[in-house]
Image (cartoon, grey):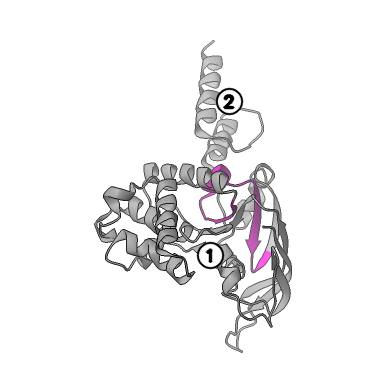
Amino acid sequence: MAVILEKVYYKYDVDDNTSEEYGIFDISMTVEQGRTVGIIGKTGSGKSTLMQHLNALYLPQKGKVTIGEFVVDRKSKDLKNLRKKVGMVFQYPEDQLFEETIYNDLAFGPKNLGLTNDQIENAIKGAMEDLELDFESMKDRSPYELSGGQKRKVAIASVLAMNPEILVLDEPTAGLDPKSKKDLLNLLISIKNKRNLTLFFVSHNMDDVFLLTEYVYVMCDGRINFEGSVDEVFQENKKLRDLDLGVPFSVEVLELLEKRGMYNGPLKPMELEELADLIKDILRGNND
């Protein structure tokens, strides 16, 4: 299911005494089905506002959003069928867990879609399996008894149980310890591939964006400042820093090595295993 935004504009009402504008302005993008897209920008850049147009929580004041056969503009109504297709996972989604058992929490969305009891159970089993949560041992447990990482998985599973075709993740690894973060990112990659999801990933963590995404939109003041493949974007280190964004850890290490005269290659992001091998080669060379 492709996602196409054409000059989407949404401006918040603000105090008349300020000249600042808040919202998103003339946003255009085309994301083909099955792609993984990163959306980055500092706080207030418009990332969340943009994402909430994807399932019509906000309707564009100008322009339009096309998602598969659905066209959303300022006059759109009866958007229930669209919202079945677009799953939203907000930051700290575990704060939205509210039922007495994990099963009931995961059943809430599918029930609202009108699924039968058997369909609901199958949807829950599939979502829990994808997130490596054991159905039999966990379905009757309270979500409040779980660790932070498990709660996050349950919250994401509650969205997957509705079988969306598009998944929007807003800072899904925020607050997790390094191991839980790595585990969740690996699961998200697996789930995306297994279900052929179109995935939008909003994050302030540049390493997460590098690991998970294929194409990146960089936002500033409600507009797309620049865009490109993940490798292209993360070679624009000065642009990213000028926008108060960081660069992946591997790039910081390569910059440090360059300053010390130990490296003169491209300042490109890489996975930690590749970085470790490079550093070993550099040290061996210095010792020869």
Q: What stretch of residues is rendered in magenta? A: 197-223
- Tell me the crowding category of disc 1: few under 14, some 14 to 19, or many 20 or more residues within 10 angstroms, Cα based: few
Residue drawn at point x = 69 percent, y = 44 percent? 232
The one of 212 and 87 positioned closer to us in this rendering: 87
Q: Amino acid at mark 1?
A: Thr
Q: Is residue 207 magenta?
A: yes
Evaluate whether residue 174 shows in this view: no
- Give residue 217's quadrant in the image: bottom right
Secondary structure under badge 2? loop
Tell me the quadrant of the picture where the C terminus can be found. top right
Rendered image: mark on residue 33? none
* In the depicted structure, whether residue 62 falls above or below residue 54: below
Tell me the quadrant of the picture where the N terminus can be found. bottom right
Pointer 2 residue: 262
* In the depicted structure, whether residue 286 falls above or below residue 34: above
Number of marks drawn: 2
Evaluate whether residue 182 shows in this view: yes
* In the depicted structure, whether residue 109 falls above or below residue 20: above
Q: Amino acid at mark 2?
A: Met
* In the depicted structure, whether residue 177 falls above or below residue 83: above
Q: Is residue 194 magenta?
A: no
x, y percentage for residue 253?
Answer: 53, 35
- The mark closer to the camera, 1 or 2, is 1
Left or right: 205 as drawn, with respect to 176: right
What separation in Å lies between label 1 and label 2 (alpha carbons)? Answer: 36 Å
x, y percentage for residue 186?
Answer: 48, 42
Pointer 1 residue: 43
